[in-house]
Image (cartoon, rainbow, N blue to C red):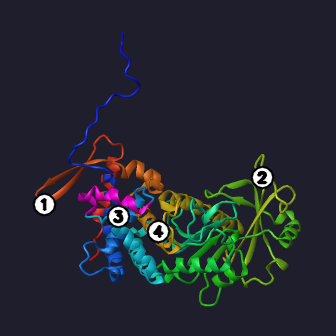
Amino acid sequence: MKKRIGSYPRVRSEGGGRGVVCQAGGVLLVETVRKAGLDQAISAALAPWRKPRAVHDPGKILLDVALAVALGGDCLADAGMLRAEQAVFGPVASDPTVSRLVSALAAGGKRALTALRQARAQVREHVWRLAGDAAPDAAGQVVVDLDGVLVIAHSEKQDAAATWKKTYGHHPLMGFVDHGRGGTGEPVAGLLRPGNAGSNTAADHIEAARLALAQLPKKYRRGRRTLIRTDSGGGTHEFVDCLSARGRWLAYSVGMTITDAIHQAVLKVPAPAWTPAVEPDGEIHDGAWVAELGGDCLKGWPEGMRLIVRKERPHPGAQLRFTNADGMRLTCFATNTKHTSIAELELRHRQRARAEDRIRAARATGLTNLPLHDAAQNQIWLEIIQIALDLLAWMPLLALTGQARLWEPRRLRLRLFSAAAQLVTTGRRRILRFAKHWPWTGLITDALQRLAALPTPD
């Protein structure tokens, strides 16, 4: 008779292990910080907040919190996971020191936020130069997606309010640079707003666009080489006027609400004027058509604006709205791009859905909850989240290839960052020996070699 031992082997456990590094794959983010020069830039930006005789550099403290968030943390105290591995992450400040720095930066208001944002913009331009053909501006145009995020609050935090979805919390407005089909995206704007902030508030969209443009290299801060995409929340006169204002001349593709005038114009479009919608591979999208509207629908809008409407056969079981026509679901957007077919423009606007992937990544990287009470402190937390998301975008951009470049934060943490390694000290060098049997060890070591081949900033 065989004794049953269960489905898994029985293992005894004990403490006292030495020479083993947990979260060793996090060295990928550390090397990305070094090659991007982010540590030097943040340290210089926060130099005014360093007290005399301080042991820890404020820039290093903030980067440690951002690294902890990138590795899966969701509060300031999670920097303790780095403190346990000083051989990889260096000296890490205590929890009270981290808390005091965040309070000091929050008290600094716009001055502290401006310093952090300028440092990130400086490093971003350098990273894009290092990325070469993989950079988001390699095709000659930068695409920025703006979208709102609902963050639930479970306590009485400052500016927390009832949201339009009958929840309670905050309603930040985020901006992301789209890396296209071959990559992910990186944050360029994070505007913390009360929960009752409107989805189509023009002033907030203008401010988010301003923050996003300030994160781009100077040559992309005006002109048609920068495309701003939004959902129907950006389809307001004030926002479109701002994007197309003299001296700015940005390209835009903004969703529009189906008004009664647009609805009536759609009903008058002749059948030959409808063009089949297309897919990214160039094939026709079955059951969807696009057409361009004109006439009274464009009155009062900036000159050169094009209004494009899409109708599609709804999926089985989908509920129609009163704005639908002839059993077809209608969506509409406006753009000022000329000399491009309406099918291509509609496909380009539909690819704005990739912003939802960026929001999902942000929720998995500290945006599920705003852990602090004061709004100014939570705005600093939002900046920390953006630094973490920058690292999670820059590391694949510089070090990974193929499908691995598309991995979202949760998959990067599971396959790469969670890898364990043995720390070996020989001479004056420290060597991490990753487990040979780990399926993605080769991917980690190849990525580290690519990062090592990049020039180190002075």
* Residue mark closest to the camera, 2 vs 4: 4
Farthest residue, direction left: 427
Is residue 385 a member of the stretch shown in magenta?
no
Label located before the other in sequence (3 or 4): 3
Left or right: 397 in relation to 264: left
Q: Residue 337 carries which label?
A: none
Q: Residue 314 carries which label?
A: 2
Q: Which label's residue is closer to the chain start, 2 or 3?
A: 3
Which residue type carries mark 1?
Answer: Arg
Identified by mark 4, the residue type is Trp
SS at mark 4? helix
Looking at the picture, which amino acid does disc 3 mark?
Answer: Asp
Please provide the residue range marked out in magenta.
Answer: 75-90
Q: Name the residue under label 1.
A: 428
Of mark 1 and mark 2, the one earlier in the sequence is: 2
**Image depth: mark 2 or mark 3 in front:** 3
Q: In this view, does 157 lie above or below 220?
A: above
Residue type, mark 2 in image: Pro
The residue drawn where x is 73% and y is 81% is: 237
Between marks 2 and 4, how big is the CA–CA gap? 41 Å
Could you tell which of marks 4 and 1 lies nearer the N-terminus? 4
